[in-house]
């Protein structure tokens, strides 16, 4: 019989590969996997505490309460939406997906993470801007448009406030310092 595991900090394809490896070594048969979530059946040699320990060694964590699960699902959904460019009416769409009000989601997130949902989203967007700058395929106006900013000036102000430098200064650094998505909160 399959069990669903929610896993904190599982936010990218490399994370999925690492988690799948751990589940396999702990004798689980994985039936499905997506960011933050694994459905797997236990094997004869399965030891859940060993699984949890191995996950923690790699920077992941089994989530065992409803609030943490919801917060992790919000993070995964935000990351996915920002990666795919679905940033218009972001909080409204999240509220609809989780069948909660925007205020309820924001309060829940802030209480759990010590950071507002808006600040977390801005941090994700800033890391995406850094990625776009490093790739060099879009100019600043195109980057702003792709992340649904009103204009490139708004993005420029937010970037400078978050990083302490302008986007041009960041572009000219060439020794870029980006956070991985699981390290934002």
Image (tube, rainbow, N blue to C red):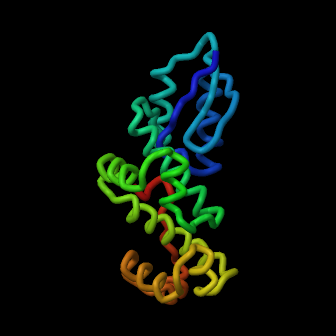
Q: Residue at x 66, y 82 (%)?
A: 138
- Count of numbered badges drawn on the protein: 0
Compared with 30, 162 (above or below) is below
Q: Is residue 181 left or right of residue 30?
A: left
The residue sitting at 42% across, 29% down in the picture is 64
Rendered view: 75 above or below 54: below
For the residue pair 78 and 172, the one nearer the viewer reads as 78
Q: Quadrant of the N terminus?
A: top right
Q: In the displayed image of the protein, which residue is found farthest to the top? A: 44
On-image quarter of the C terminus: bottom left
| Looking at the image, residue 172 lies above or below residue 71 | below
Q: Nearer the viewer, residue 168 or 37?
A: 37
| Residue 157 percent coordinates (x, y) | 41, 85
Q: Residue at x 54, y 45 (%)?
A: 10
Question: Which of the 4 image quarters holds residue 163?
Answer: bottom left
Task: State left or right for residue 70 relative to residue 35.
Answer: left
x 50%, y 59%: residue: 92
Residue 82, picture quadrant: bottom right
Q: Is residue 23 left or right of residue 108?
A: right
Placement of 48 over or under 135, stated as above or below: above
- The image position of residue 171, as x and y in percent, is 54, 84
Q: Residue 135: image x %, image y %?
A: 66, 76
């Amino acid at each position: 019989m399959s069990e669903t595991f929610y896993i904190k900090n599982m936010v990218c394809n490399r994370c999925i590969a690492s988690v799948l490896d751990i589940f396999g070594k702990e004798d689980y048969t994985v039936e499905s996997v997506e960011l933050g979530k694994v459905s797997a059946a236990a094997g004869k040699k399965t030891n859940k505490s060993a699984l949890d320990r191995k996950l923690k060694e790699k920077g992941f964590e089994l989530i065992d309460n409803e609030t943490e699960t919801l917060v992790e699902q919000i993070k995964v959904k935000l990351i996915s939406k920002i990666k795919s460019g679905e940033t218009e009416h972001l909080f409204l769409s999240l509220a609809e997906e989780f069948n909660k009000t925007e205020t309820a989601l924001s309060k829940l997130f802030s209480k759990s993470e010590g950071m507002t949902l808006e600040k977390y989203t801005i941090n994700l967007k800033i890391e995406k801007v850094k990625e776009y700058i490093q790739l060099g395929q879009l100019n600043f106006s195109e980057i702003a448009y792709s992340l649904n900013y009103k204009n490139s000036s708004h993005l420029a102000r937010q970037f400078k406030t978050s990083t302490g430098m302008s986007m041009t200064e960041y572009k000219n650094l060439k020794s870029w310092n980006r956070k991985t998505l699981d390290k934002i909160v």
